[in-house]
Image (spheres, rainbow, N blue to C red):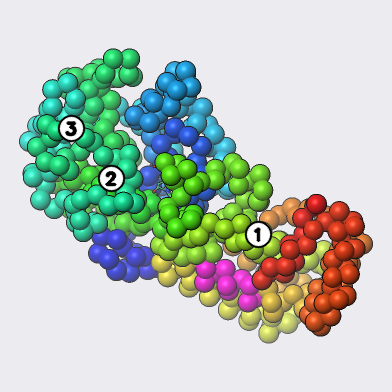
Amino acid sequence: MQIYNTLTKQKEEFLPAGSPVRMFVCGPTVYDYIHIGNARTFVIFDVVAKWLRHQGYDLTYIQNITDIEDKIITRAAEHNKDVFAYSRELENAFYKDTQVLGITSPEYKRATDHIPEVIKQVQQLTEKGYAYLIEGDGWYFDLTKFPEYGKLSGRTAMMADDAVSRIDENDKKRNRGDFCLWKLSKEGEPSWPSELGAGRPGWHIEDTAITEKYLGQQYDLHGGGMDLMFPHHEAEIAQMEAISGKKPFVKFWMHSGFLVNKNAKMSKSLGNFMTAHEALEHYSPEALRFYFLSAHYRSPLDYSEDNLKQAEAATARLGECVAKVKRFEDEMLVEHNTAISTMIRQSEEAFAEALDDDFNTPQALAVLFDLLKAINPLLTKRGFDMENGQRLLEFFEMVHSVLGVVPGNLPKLPKTLEMLIDQRERARHSKDYALADKLRNQIEEQGYKVDDTTYGPLIKKL
Ligand code: AMP
């Protein structure tokens, strides 16, 4: 399996240090509902984890929950709520959204459940001479002590798209980029007692504290959105390599591209976002996942209603194919057709090849649609045999277990409506647009709307 490694800037054979494979992805800061940009990243790494498991790797996959942070404290105060009650409410909303989206692969670990581990790491950094105290503010990492800072992103200064919440400003810092490890408590803020002074974790330390506990001082795979590469992931490397003296902290780094809306990264601070919850009111989880996976994970993905509509139609086609096989099972031919089984086998191989090549999901989806195009007419003409029917169902089941894009329960349309839709499709294919328009009107009279997409008609209740 080949994975593009941000650290070496090339695709490399994925060779984990041992078994189980150890993987970590930065989780949400629970101060608001997740938006579909966050959801894209979480779905991408859900697919990475599921594919690794499908390919036979035993995998430990951890994601952290940042449940203590400045933004959480500010928002809780704005809502007149206790900080912990507020963060727990948003954490639960996150679990609900991810569950509906079929994100089932990670084990979640809260920052506030790992305060002793955080304190221990900050103490180790102070003992080794990497940390210094700014009175009344906190303990900082001294970047001059770690000259390799910047080796992942190739830079040491902020850029516009970096995760802005990760900057620590204090004019007493020794170096501009020094980041906070332990924030001393201010009046009325939550804090934990420590020899460092009562306080709470800085921006970056919870991740290394959690990963050291569950994955060790070095592990195989670390993922997150592109905005976290600098300074967050650089800080993680500096912290862990300074403590352990072992390199590399992580062998493979994967970074997902942004979901972009109106030429800017979708983000809560810009206000150009749609929450996952809102999106799920309009689109099925399978369609959202299809949309996220329709671009390569390292590429940006444009937000557009049309793309989401196309994704809805595409997943409906996949679901319909499965439903058709199940519906016609009793009428299938007994005699085995080897040409069809060769076609399915080739698709299975091409699908695996695409995902083994740096998780090329658009290519994997294209393989599915090529297969669909070839088998749909055979299914309609009852030219399919039982053995191939079974094999096709198994293939689609596997596809769904990894990508989560095949809906199981499509809304049942009235028989007369299905006939009108079929007739209209035939009219469109034979370029009889006058008849197609007439049939569209008849469909609308039955209370349904048709949108023509590249994957076929998408039917919605008016
Ligand atoms: P946050 O809660 O802001 O730390 O974000 C959670 C995850 O979502 C991180 O891995 C971010 O990199 C990722 N993320 C944030 N915005 C976007 C976006 N517009 N597109 C894709 N991923 C994003």
Query: Which residue has dot 3 on it?
Result: 170
Which amino acid is tagged 3?
A: Asn
Element under disc 2: helix
Mark positioned earlier in the residue sequence (1 or 3): 3
Tell me which residue sits at (81%, 73%) in the image.
425
Of labels 3 and 2, the one closer to you: 3
Q: Position of residue 412 (x, y in %)?
A: 82, 54
Callout 3: few (<14), some (14-19), or many (20+) C-alpha neighbours within 10 Å? Answer: some
Q: Which mark is residue 223?
A: none
Tell me which residue sits at (41%, 67%) in the image.
358
The span picked out in magenta is: 362-371
Which amino acid is tagged 2?
A: His
Left or right: residue 363 versus residue 162 is: right
Q: Is residue 195 visible?
A: yes
Query: Which residue has dot 1 on it?
Result: 309
Of labels 1 and 3, the one closer to you: 3
Callout 1: few (<14), some (14-19), or many (20+) C-alpha neighbours within 10 Å? Answer: many
Quadrant of the rendered image containing residue 368: bottom right
